[in-house]
Every structure is written in C-alpha cells, then in structure tokens.
C-alpha cells in the first residue's frame, strides 16, 4: 500500500535553508528496497543510480540494516584516541580483499583522495618531489586539492588559483604520460575506470605500462576507486582485472552501502610514511560506519554479490547492444560489470526524463553518455525491465544533425 506525502513544505524549507549548490529537485524519495525506490506520491521506480554507486547492495540491505541497528544501540562513536573493535576488523577485510596494505579511514571520496595526495607529498618531500600527474576528464572530488587534481575543467571554474602541484595528461595515452614526468613528479593518479568522465575503462596494456613507468621512474601509482571500487565492476576493486597493483588506493561511496565512510589503503611497505600526528579525521572509522562496511564485505563473501554483478553486467550490456539496431543514435555500449555507459548521438537529458516518466531512474556522465549503475544485487527481470523502459524512452529521440 502506498502513502502520499505532500513535499511542498520540504521543498520550501530546502529553498529557504539549504544552500542551492545542487540543481533544484522535483521529486522526493521516501523509501527504498533493493533496486526499487518510492517517491512521496507513492510511485515506484527502478533505481539504476544506486545513489551514484553508493547503495551497491541495494537499498536497506538486511545485513547492513541489522548491523547498523545493532551497533547504534551499542556504541556509535569513539575518538581515534581509543581502539574500537570494528575499525581494524574492517581494515583487515579491505586489506584481505585487495593488496594486504594499511588502511586509513575517513568519511568521503574527496577526503580519501586528499589522503592519497598527502601520502604522495609526504613520501616525496625529502627529495623535493610533489607533483602529481592526473588525467584529463578525471574526477576526484570537490575539496581544493582534489579539485586541482580533477581534469574536468568545469568543476574548477571560479575557484582559481588552482592548488599547485597537479598536471594533466590524456587518459589511456602512455607516451603522453611518460613525456610529462619531470624532476618534481612524485605520483600518477587515475581512476581505473573513469566514472564522471563517461565510463571509460583503462586499456589493459596502458595500465600495465603505467605501472612499469612508475616503477622505472620511482613514482607512486595511485588509484581512485571511489566509484569503480567496491564490487562495481565485478571484482572487489577494478584494478584486480588488470594484473597490476597500485601503491595506494582510495575508496568510499559503496564501502558503507550508504553510511558515510571513506578510506585509503597504502602498500604495507609504506607504513612509515604517514606517522602519528601527520593525518587524522574526527569521524574516520567510527564503530557505526565500520559496522556497515563489515556487513558489506560479508555480503560480498557470502551472498554471491560479485558473481551476480558479472552475470547481470553481461546481460545488461548484451541487451543494450540490442538497442543499437532500432536506435542508430546509440553509438557505443561500454563498461565493466555493472558500471555501464551508453554513448549517444543525442542529448542524454531527454532520454533520462522519458525514462523517469516510465519508472526508471538513471544517470548521465557528460552531455551524451547514459550512465547505468544498478545495485549489484539486481535481478535479470529488473535488468530486462530497465532495458525495456530505455527502449521506450529512446523511441522518438531525434539524432543530432
Ligand atoms: C572517482 C571519484 N572520486 C572521488 C569522488 C568524490 O567523492 P565524494 O563525493 O564522496 O567526496 C567521486 C564522486 O563522484 C568519484 O566518482
């Protein structure tokens, strides 16, 4: 049974009291379960955004709900001046599912990337090296350092001067990267699969080449797995499909399935770079947030989540490929696992509006890329339903001249 909630008061309060940094919304979501959400009018939607790759286990996953409810009644927060049993447990799970490193906890993707940047600067400090080579079209966050590392210029506009120490090269271009390395260069930062940049996966030979280059030139290789990590591409972390390891990596978004938590992990050999007093975060690694993270890894290990992601990702991409014949403006279907992009020759905005009218929430990446990030627990029936809705939404879309 659906209830109808008037959201005019919410809208008015939002307009009056919340800083307008987001485009105005015209819908209020009140409930979520798995791949479904309901709005205040009782309308049900298939959610192929998952909170922009946050609710990777779907909304209100029973394991996560049970873990945070139990922990909320026991201990929500302690400072990092004391042990809390959940923090090292989650760190061990992250390390065990990646490269066995050392983990620092924070609260968001930007904060995790700030940590990577500080780690690299500290490591290079005594040799006078600080510069980080970053990728065009990358996105690393909205703080000043992560903005300066973000290749998408529109995000930096109006906030000059950029923090110094970052330079951009084209993604997937090894020669350009090799050429850019200078005496001050200390690290290379990249997303193994660019998210905001349009779902662009690193080419395998490129990533291997970057690793070799970093080894040869004594540079740190830093991966931003904030969007492509936590199972999104079918492996726990996207880099694991490439046969290379980073020196350090950031994660956030789906680490708590919606409970705010971020982290970065450095290889064990770098455990003396960030020493006591060099980095901290009041809320980093609270018992509550870590309880959510532990539940996420338990679901990965016990519920076949990654296997489902691979199977449903293949199904989704196959079905989307099938749209090409009927809709010639579908230029390319790409991605890994359930991180899927559909490049269109028409503005994606119109298609998103029509999809929503038909009950599907999806995202864009730039002007022409439809971005689909369903929960990794999505079913085949839900994938088929979503593609059916997209087909209907595409009908009537006019190709660009
Ligand atoms: C790859 C990547 N890095 C960093 C961030 C920033 O994360 P947050 O918004 O949690 O600060 C994002 C957010 O979309 C992202 O996609």
Image (cartoon, rainbow, N blue to C red):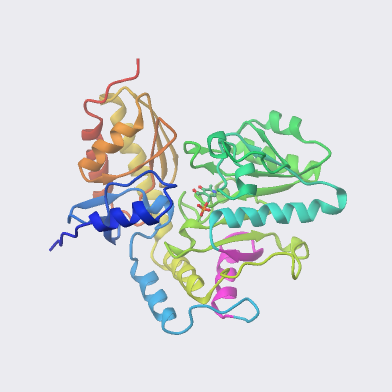
| Residue 86 within the segment the image draws in magenta | yes
Q: Is residue 2 magenta?
A: no
* Front position in the image: 93 or 162: 162
Q: Please state the horizontal and vertical placement of residue 194, each as a whole percent of the image.
A: 52, 41
Q: Position of residue 380 (x, y in %)?
A: 27, 50
- Is residue 56 or residue 98 the one in the foreground? 56
> Is 255 displayed left or right of 17 in the figure?
right
Name the residue at the top extreme.
401
Q: Is residue 390 visible?
A: yes
Q: Residue furthest front?
A: 16
Residue 280 falls in image quadrant? bottom right
Asked if residue 243 shows in the view, the reply is: no
Tally the marks: 0
Left or right: 275 with respect to 42?
A: right
Question: Is 8 placed above or below 157 here?
Answer: below
From the image, which quarter does the N terminus lie in? Answer: bottom left
Front residue of this view, candidates 215 and 152 = 152
User: Could you tell me which quadrant the C terminus lies in?
Assistant: top left
Q: Which residues are magenta?
A: 84-106
Quadrant of residue 343 in the image? top left
Q: What percent of the width, then of the height, locates residue 126?
A: 86, 53
Residue at the image position 49 percent from the left and 70 percent from the top: 289
Picture quarter containing residue 62? bottom left
Q: Residue at x 41, y 83 (%)?
A: 73
Q: Position of residue 212 (x, y in %)?
A: 73, 41
Left of 219 or right of it: where is 295? Answer: left
Residue at 81 percent of width and 41 percent of height: 184
């Amino acid at each position: 049974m659906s209830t109808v909630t008037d959201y005019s008061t919410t809208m008015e309060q939002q307009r009056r009291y919340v800083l307008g940094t987001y485009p105005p919304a015209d819908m209020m979501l009140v409930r979520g379960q798995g791949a479904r959400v309901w709005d205040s009018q009782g309308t049900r939607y298939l959610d192929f955004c998952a909170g922009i790759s946050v609710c990777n286990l779907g909304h209100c996953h029973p394991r996560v709900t049970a873990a945070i409810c139990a922990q909320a009644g026991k201990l929500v927060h302690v400072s990092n001046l004391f042990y809390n049993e959940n923090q090292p447990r989650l760190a061990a799970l992250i390390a065990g599912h990646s490269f066995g490193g050392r983990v620092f906890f924070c609260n968001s993707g930007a904060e995790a990337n700030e940590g990577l940047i500080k780690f690299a600067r500290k490591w290079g400090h005594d040799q006078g090296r600080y510069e980080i080579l970053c990728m065009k079209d990358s996105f690393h966050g909205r703080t000043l350092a992560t903005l300066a590392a973000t290749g998408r210029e529109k995000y930096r506009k109006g906030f000059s001067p950029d923090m110094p120490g970052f330079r951009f090269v084209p993604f997937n271009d090894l020669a350009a990267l090799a050429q850019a390395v200078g005496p001050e260069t200390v690290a290379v930062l990249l997303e193994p699969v660019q998210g905001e940049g349009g779902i662009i996966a690193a080419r395998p030979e490129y990533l291997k080449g970057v690793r070799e280059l970093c080894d040869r030139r004594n540079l740190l290789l830093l991966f931003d797995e904030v969007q492509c990590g936590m199972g999104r591409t079918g492996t726990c972390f996207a880099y694991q499909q490439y046969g290379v390891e980073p020196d350090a990596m950031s994660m956030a978004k789906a680490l708590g399935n919606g409970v705010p938590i971020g982290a970065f992990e450095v290889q064990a050999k770098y455990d003396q770079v960030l020493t006591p007093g060099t980095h901290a975060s009041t809320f980093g690694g609270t018992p509550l947030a870590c309880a959510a993270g532990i539940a996420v890894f338990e679901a990965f290990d016990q519920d076949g989540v990654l296997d489902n992601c691979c199977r449903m990702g293949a199904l989704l991409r196959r079905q989307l490929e099938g749209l090409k014949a009927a809709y010639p403006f579908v230029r390319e279907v790409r991605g890994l696992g359930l991180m899927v992009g559909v490049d269109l020759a028409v503005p994606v905005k119109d298609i998103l509006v029509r999809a929503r009218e038909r009950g599907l929430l999806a995202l864009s990446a730039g002007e022409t890329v439809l971005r689909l990030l369903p929960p990794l627990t999505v079913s085949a029936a839900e994938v088929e339903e979503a593609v059916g809705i997209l087909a209907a939404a595409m009908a009537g879309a006019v190709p660009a001249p």
